[in-house]
């Protein structure tokens, strides 16, 4: 290392060396700027999955996985979960500061009055098979917004970009509810603008024309909390996808549609859906002990879903917050479901069993969110859709941030080629 702001890298094979500058963050480790490396040494870096590579600078979310820290714009997630609401958090993510009363009222009004879908959306929605997975429908429907909002789309104009972000935040819940209702044969419900964000979504999901919907306050409160906790999580696969597509100058609705598709993967947003499938596989509360024993046996092929986290090495701060709400929801709603009893028995076993405690395999946010969704009557195939509604706030915030970067470049990862060496074409008869 030549000084505190750079590192000296030497290539033993060629004898070449290059001094690479350090890029500091306001919190956390610095990054080594390797942009000069190929020109100076002829080498690129290899980082499968980009797990040791910073692809951008961002001021939105900070995570310290070892310490169990998650902050949005510098605010600890614990404070936002306790004092804020999802729409205010969305404003914070998009704008960098918490709104005052006047700013929030204007923001809420804008989101509320962009919730409607164009009537032509019905025809597009009805083109899907009724039994299609809701995430398949959501991916297509969000992408189709690009066909409705393309005239006058000037990405050089900050107001045009802001309006696109507002539309996405407003319309994704409407589209999500429509996908669900179509899948079960119910008539679509228009958004009720006299309701707040989460209540409005719940009414679009569950209200029927024949009778008003009555929900206990804990339902909206729990869902709002889950939306806050899922709003953003730094450069995860779906957010990185939105940024990669956004780097090409693509339509913002297409960028977010790509994020929805990435979120659908079972290793990403589908994790809470996998939790419920695991609980169903265990079956009965009295079989939890056997399941725990199977999980300890590496040869069994059985995994406990919703335990531990790739980023958080000690505990998931979101799980700590949502655990209390999970037990409150089950208590207030008086839910009596064998699958949820399996979940509670499993949680108890994992928190006490030395095998899980020593390996820090704690229940994570996916474990608890799946339980809450189940208790609220949301079907398993809609779990990832709920995640997408919340994460839209993060996606549009990262897209907006990216569009403001003066030195933004199109994403173009490199590769290590491991294919065939040069060879000559042979006619089909001689192969």
Image: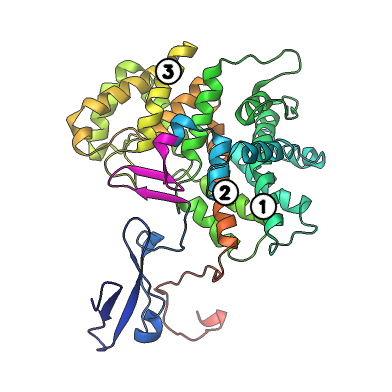
Q: Nearer the viewer, residue 270 or 74?
A: 74
- First in sequence: mark 3 or mark 2? 2
Q: Position of residue 156 (x, y in %)?
A: 69, 64
Q: Are marks 2 and 1 in contact (CB under 8 Å)?
A: yes
The magenta stretch spans residue 324: no
Residue found at the far bottom of this picture: 15
Write down the quadrant of residue 151 in the picture: bottom right
User: Of helix, strand and loop, which one carries label 2?
Assistant: helix
In this figure, which residue is indicated by the disc labeled 2?
94
User: Of helix, strand and loop, which one carries label 1?
Assistant: helix
Mark 3 neighbour density, 10 Å: few (under 14) some (14–19) many (20 or more): some
- Alpha-carbon span between mark 2 and mark 1: 9 Å
**In the image: residue 66, left or right of residue 182:** left
**Magenta residues, start to end:** 60-79
Query: Closer to us: mark 3 or mark 2?
Result: 2
Mark 1 neighbour density, 10 Å: few (under 14) some (14–19) many (20 or more): some
Q: Are marks 1 and 3 in contact (CB under 8 Å)?
A: no
Mark 2 neighbour density, 10 Å: few (under 14) some (14–19) many (20 or more): many
- Alpha-carbon span between mark 3 and mark 2: 31 Å
Q: Which mark is residue 14?
A: none
Q: Which residue is drawn at the image coordinates 47% and 34% (left, top)?
A: 273
**In the image: residue 171, left or right of residue 91:** right
In this figure, which residue is indicated by the disc labeled 3?
328
Q: Which mark is residue 162?
A: 1
For residue 318, say whether it is visible: yes
For residue 385, say whether it is visible: no
Q: Nearer the viewer, residue 95 or 9?
A: 95
Q: Nearer the viewer, residue 236 or 170?
A: 170
Q: Position of residue 296 (x, y in %)?
A: 22, 34
């Amino acid at each position: 290392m030549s000084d505190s702001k750079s590192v000296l890298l030497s290539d033993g094979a060629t004898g070449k060396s290059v001094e690479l500058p350090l890029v500091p963050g306001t919190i956390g480790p610095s990054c080594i700027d390797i942009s000069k490396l190929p020109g100076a040494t002829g080498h690129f870096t290899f980082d499968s999955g980009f797990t040791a590579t910073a692809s951008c600078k961002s001021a939105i979310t900070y995570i310290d996985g070892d310490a169990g820290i998650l902050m949005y714009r510098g605010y600890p997630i614990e404070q936002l979960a306790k004092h804020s609401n999802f729409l205010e958090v969305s404003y914070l993510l998009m704008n960098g500061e918490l709104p005052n009363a006047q700013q929030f009222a204007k923001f809420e009004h804008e989101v509320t009055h962009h919730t409607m879908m164009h009537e032509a959306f019905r025809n597009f929605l009805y083109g899907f098979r009724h039994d299609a997975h809701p995430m398949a429908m959501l991916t297509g429907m969000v992408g189709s917004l690009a066909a409705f909002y393309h005239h006058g789309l000037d990405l050089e104009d900050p107001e045009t970009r802001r309006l696109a972000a507002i539309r996405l935040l407003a319309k994704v819940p409407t589209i999500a509810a429509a996908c669900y209702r179509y899948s079960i044969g119910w008539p679509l419900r228009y958004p009720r603008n006299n309701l707040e964000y989460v209540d409005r979504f719940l009414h679009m999901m569950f209200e029927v024309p024949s009778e008003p919907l009555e929900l206990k306050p804990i339902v909206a409160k729990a869902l709002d909390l889950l939306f806050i906790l899922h709003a953003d999580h730094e450069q995860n696969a779906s957010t990185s996808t939105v940024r990669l597509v956004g780097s090409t100058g693509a339509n913002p609705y297409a960028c977010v549609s790509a994020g929805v598709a990435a979120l659908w993967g079972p290793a990403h947003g589908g994790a809470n859906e996998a939790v419920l499938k695991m609980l169903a596989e265990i079956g009965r509360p009295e079989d939890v002990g056997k399941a725990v024993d199977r999980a300890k046996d590496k040869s069994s092929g059985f995994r406990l879903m919703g335990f531990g986290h790739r980023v958080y090495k000690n505990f998931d701060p979101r799980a700590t917050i949502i655990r209390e709400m999970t037990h409150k929801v089950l208590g207030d709603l008086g839910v009596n479901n064998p699958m949820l009893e399996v979940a509670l028995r499993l949680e108890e076993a994992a928190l006490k069993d030395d095998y899980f405690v020593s390996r820090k395999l704690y229940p994570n946010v996916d474990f608890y969110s799946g339980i809450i969704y189940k208790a609220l009557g949301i079907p398993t195939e809609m779990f990832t859709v709920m995640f997408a509604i919340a994460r839209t706030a993060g996606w549009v915030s990262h897209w907006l941030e990216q569009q403001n970067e003066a030195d933004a470049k199109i994403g173009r990862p490199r590769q290590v080629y491991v294919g065939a060496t040069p060879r000559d074409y042979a006619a089909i008869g001689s192969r």
